[in-house]
DNA sequence: CAGTATCCTATCGGATACTG
DNA sequence: CAGTATCCGATAGGATACTG
């Protein structure tokens, strides 16, 4: 039981939902679900995302304390992204949603957003 | 197991995710979770949503076969929105996400989207 | 009551080019 | 490799006014 309510406009729960309830956030968190990935690996795994949106989404998730960024001491140096504990706790909800999308994609009528 | 994959740009699963993975869709579906509601009731329950976005979101969900619209033969006549069976199946994922947002809202750092 | 129509701004998001 | 900078068109989304 929490004091927060997504139905209230000014509630932190709503702000939180705004942060995580969008396609790119869901896919990125889902993508990091099996372990840390480097920027390029994420970019490769997530079809159709531009570097701009990937970076923007990662920064947003970092600010929300869902993801951490770590510079690797390899050569050539890379950057690794990893879910925080909070991010891990989000993984479950996000996975459920992503799997729902995969399992029911063929039941949607004309899902062209015209 | 389905053939669809949210990591693929052109996969129907991605289109589906685009349809449901946004704040208003989540809140509206969550709001209809306890049973059908009239337009005005929805508008009242969901803080901060404009009539424009409520209508737009409902139409989008209708097109996706997640919600049905029914005109009531009452006086003064109203309109009732109800989750379809497919919408009901989405309720679970969406509820998990909404509850996560409520339970972890205080753990996010500065979640102002600056 | 349940919308639609219009206006206007902010953000989304791809394309391209550039950097340490 | 992992970004940033800039440009630009498309969409999100609030405000207000109007309608059957």
Image (cartoon, coloured by chain):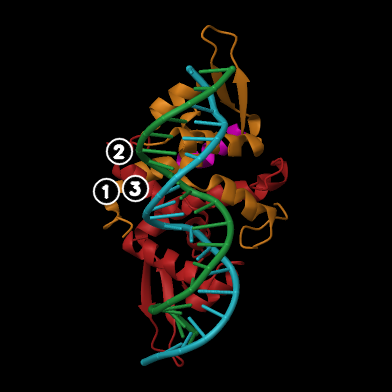
Chain colours: A red, B orange, C cyan, D green
Q: Which residue is mark 2?
A: A4
Q: Secondary structure at mark 3?
A: helix
Q: CA distance from mark 3 to mark 2?
A: 11 Å
- Residue B109 lies in what quarter of the image? bottom left
Q: Which mark is residue A90?
A: none
Residues behind callouts 2 and 1 on a single chain = no
Q: CA distance from mark 1 to mark 3?
A: 11 Å
Q: What residue is drawn where x is 29% and y is 40%? A: A10
Say if the magenta span includes residue B92: yes
Q: Which residue is mark 1?
A: B106
Mark 1 touches mark 3? (CB < 8 Å): no
Which region is colored magenta?
B87-96
Q: Which chain is home to disc 2?
A: A
Q: Which chain is home to disc 3?
A: A
As displayed, is residue B13 above or below residue B74? below
Q: Which mark is residue A15?
A: 3
Question: Callout 2 environment at 10 Å: few (<14), some (14 to 19), or many (20+)?
Answer: some
Residue B35 in sight here: no
Mark 3 touches mark 2? (CB < 8 Å): no
Mark 2 touches mark 1? (CB < 8 Å): yes
Question: Between residues C20 and B83, which one lies in front from this camera angle?
Answer: C20
Q: Earlier in the sequence, mark 3 or mark 2?
A: 2
Residue A59: % across, % down: 38, 67
């Amino acid at each position: 039981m929490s004091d927060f309510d997504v139905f209230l406009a000014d509630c932190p729960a709503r702000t939180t939902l705004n942060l995580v309830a969008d396609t790119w956030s869901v896919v990125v968190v889902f993508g990091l679900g099996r372990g840390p990935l480097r920027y390029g690996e994420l970019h490769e795994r997530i079809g159709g995302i531009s570097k701009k949106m990937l970076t923007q989404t990662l920064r947003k998730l970092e600010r929300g304390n869902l993801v951490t960024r770590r510079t690797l001491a390899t050569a050539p140096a890379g950057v690794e992204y990893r879910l925080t504990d909070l991010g891990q706790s989000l993984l479950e909800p996000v996975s459920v949603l992503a799997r729902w999308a995969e399992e029911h994609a063929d039941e949607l009528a004309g899902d062209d957003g015209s």
